[in-house]
Image: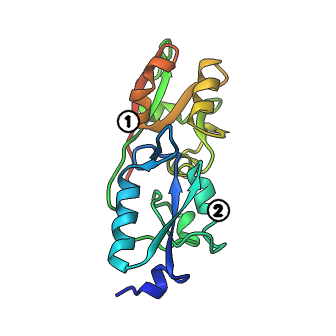
């Protein structure tokens, strides 16, 4: 069994909080952190009998980049093979589907058609689905963006053919996407 010294070596639980995945963590207008990951971290700290310190990151790649720096003790991140080189993952706690949106005039009918030479896909750098696509795609190119909002911008500016994202975020953002159609990415991550 994992002990307090392993989970909270400084005597407090330092939780890496990823604001880039608003399905788990979001910030209120007053700056308060809310969401499933906040609730889980609070409960874990309570059960360990230690205080909780939340280390806030804008994007998941930033959390992963700090994995070996001793800045945080625990975080919720997509399980991904390149991250597993420096992060010890527990069994998955949930599965989140990712997808593509293509322009309305696109001739693409399924996800297999996306992986062709010359196809450009927008995705935030080091997001779990961007890392998955980087290893899965053989021909299409990924245009890394700073965040999902930047992916939307370059999609709307027709700098890319496709935008990739977490399906709930894509659906929620359809009103921001000019003439987009949702397509699913099916993966076993």
Query: In the figure, 98 relative to 38: above or below?
Result: above
Earlier-in-chain disc, 1 versus 2: 2
Residue depicted at x 46% and y 32%: 100
Query: Visible in this render: residue 120?
Result: no
x, y (%) of residue 181? Answer: 43, 20
Of all residues, the one furthest to the front in this rendering is 30
Q: Secondary structure at mark 2?
A: helix
Query: In the figure, 71 relative to 117: above or below?
Result: below
Q: Secondary structure at mark 1?
A: helix
Residue closest to the eye, 155 or 140: 155
Residue depicted at x 32% and y 61%: 93
Residue behind mark 1: 168
Residue depicted at x 55% and y 28%: 162
Specify few, some or many for label 1: CA neighbours under 10 Å numbering under 14, 14-19, or 20 or more. Answer: some
x, y (%) of residue 149? Answer: 58, 31
Q: In the rendered view of the protein, which quadrant contains the N terminus?
A: bottom left
How far separated are the C-alphas under marks 1 and 2? 25 Å
x, y (%) of residue 58? Answer: 59, 48
x, y (%) of residue 80? Answer: 49, 60
Specify few, some or many for label 2: CA neighbours under 10 Å numbering under 14, 14-19, or 20 or more. Answer: few
* Quadrant assignment, res 118: top right
């Amino acid at each position: 069994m994992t002990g307090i010294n392993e989970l909270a070596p400084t005597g407090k639980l330092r939780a890496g909080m990823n604001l880039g995945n608003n399905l788990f963590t979001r910030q209120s207008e007053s700056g308060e952190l809310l969401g499933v990951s906040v609730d889980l971290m609070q409960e874990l700290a309570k059960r360990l009998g230690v205080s909780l310190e939340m280390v806030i990151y804008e994007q998941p790649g930033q959390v992963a980049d700090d994995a070996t720096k001793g800045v945080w003790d625990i975080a919720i991140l997509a399980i991904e093979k390149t991250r597993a080189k420096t992060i010890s993952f527990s069994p998955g706690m949930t599965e989140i589907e990712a997808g593509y949106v293509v322009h309305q005039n696109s001739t693409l009918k399924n996800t297999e058609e996306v992986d062709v030479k010359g196809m450009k896909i927008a995705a935030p750098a080091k997001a779990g689905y961007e890392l998955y696509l980087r290893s899965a795609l053989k021909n299409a190119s990924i245009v890394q963006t700073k965040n999902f909002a930047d992916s939307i911008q370059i999609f709307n500016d027709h700098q890319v053919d496709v935008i990739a994202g977490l399906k709930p975020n894509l659906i929620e953002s359809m009103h921001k996407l000019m003439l987009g159609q949702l397509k699913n990415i099916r993966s076993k991550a």
